[in-house]
Image: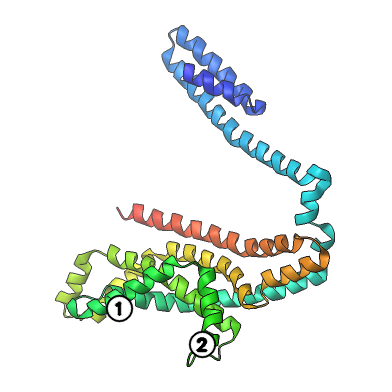
Amino acid sequence: MLTYRKAATLSLLFPPTGIPAMVHSVRAGRLAREGEIESARHEGERARDWSWYSVGFGLSVYIVAFLAWLLLTNNHAVAQVFFGWSTMTDAAAWKSLLKGFWINVQVFLIAEALVLVWALAVAVMRLLPGPACKPVRVLVTVYVDVFRGIPALLVILIVGLGLPQAHVPLLGSFSDMDYAILALTLTYGAYVSEVYRAGIESVHWSQTAAARSLGLSYTQTMRHVVVPQAVRRVIPPLLNDFIGLQKDTSLIGALGVLDVVSRARFVNNSKGTLTAYSMGAILFLLVTIPFTRWLDWLIRRQQAKTLAGR
C-alpha cells in the first residue's frame, strides 16, 4: 500500500482528483491491515486510477495556467506581439494572407502529385534485380542519400537560384514557383521513395514467386501484384510525409514567391508586430490538424483490418 499512498500524496498537487486518490489509498491500507486483501487491492487500484487522473488533469490545468500567465504578463506584451487584436481583425491582412496561402496550397498539391510518381519510380529502380542493373541502383541510392541529407531550404535555394543563373537548358525559363515545386519534389521524392521501398519489401516473397510461376514477367509482377499491395500498406506513412511537405511550402518565400510567409512579413512590417506570423500559422493548422486526424483514423482502420485478418 506504500506505492498507492505515495501516488495519492503526489496527486494532491491537483486536489479535485487528488483527494479521492488519498481517500481510496487510506481505505486500501485499512483493509490490508484487517486482512481483507481482495478489497484492499480493489481500493488500491481505484487510488491508482485517481492518481493518474490527477497527473493528466493536473498537468493540463497547470500548462493552461502557465500559458495564460505568459500571455498576460508584462502588461500583455506577449499577447500584443503575437495576437494583436487590431491585426487579427484586419480584413485586408487576412485577404492578403489567404491569397499567399493559396499559393502554398497550389505548390503542395502539384508537388505531391509529382512526388507520388517520381518516388515510386525511384523505389522500383532501386530494387531492380541482377548485376546489369547495379549502376542504376547505385545512382538511385546516391540520389536518395544526397537529397535526404541536404536541408529542404538549401535545396530550394540551390535549385531556385542556381539553375537560372547557370542557364540550364529546359530549366532556365522556369518561374520561381516552378523551381520551388521542383526542389520540393526532389527532396520529398527521396524520402517517399524509401517509404515505397519499405512497402515493396514488406510484400512476402511468395507473392512474387507465385506470379512468376504463372508466367508473369518481372515488370508485370511488380505492376499487378507487388506494387498495389505495397501502396495500400504505406498510405499512412505517405500521408505523414505529405503533412511535412505541406508545411515545408513555407520555405518557398526564400525565392521571392509571395506565399503566406512573405505576405505575413509585409503585414508585420506595416503593423509593427508579429501577429501576421501567428495568423499564417493558424491557416496551416486549419489544414494540417484535420489531415492529421484523418491520418490517425486511417492508421486505426488499418490496424483493425490487420488484427481481424489474424
Q: Which residue is mark 2?
A: 166
The residue positioned 64% from the left and 26% from the top of the image is: 13
Please state the horizontal and vertical placement of residue 190, each as a whole percent of the image: 41, 71
Query: Is residue 19 found left or right of 243 in the rendered image?
Result: right
Residue 151 marker: none
Q: Which residue is mark 1?
A: 223
Q: Amino acid at mark 2?
A: Ala
Q: Residue furthest top?
A: 34
Check disc 2 and report its element: helix, strand or loop.
Answer: helix
Q: Amino acid at mark 1?
A: Arg
Can residue 179 be seen here?
yes
The residue positioned 33% from the left and 75% from the top of the image is: 140
Please state the horizontal and vertical placement of residue 217, each as a whole percent of the image: 20, 81
Pick the front one: 289 or 310 = 289
Q: Residues within 10 Å of mark 2 (few under 14, many from 20)?
A: few
Query: Is residue 91 found left or right of 125 in the rendered image?
Result: right
Q: Residue furthest left?
A: 213
Check disc 1 and report its element: helix, strand or loop.
Answer: helix
The residue positioned 67% from the left and 61% from the top of the image is: 281
The image quadrant of residue 54 is top right
Cα gap from disc 2 to disc 1, whole angstroms: 39 Å
| 30 lies above or below 95 | above
The mark nearer the N terminus, 2 or 1, is 2
Pick the front one: 4 or 272 = 272
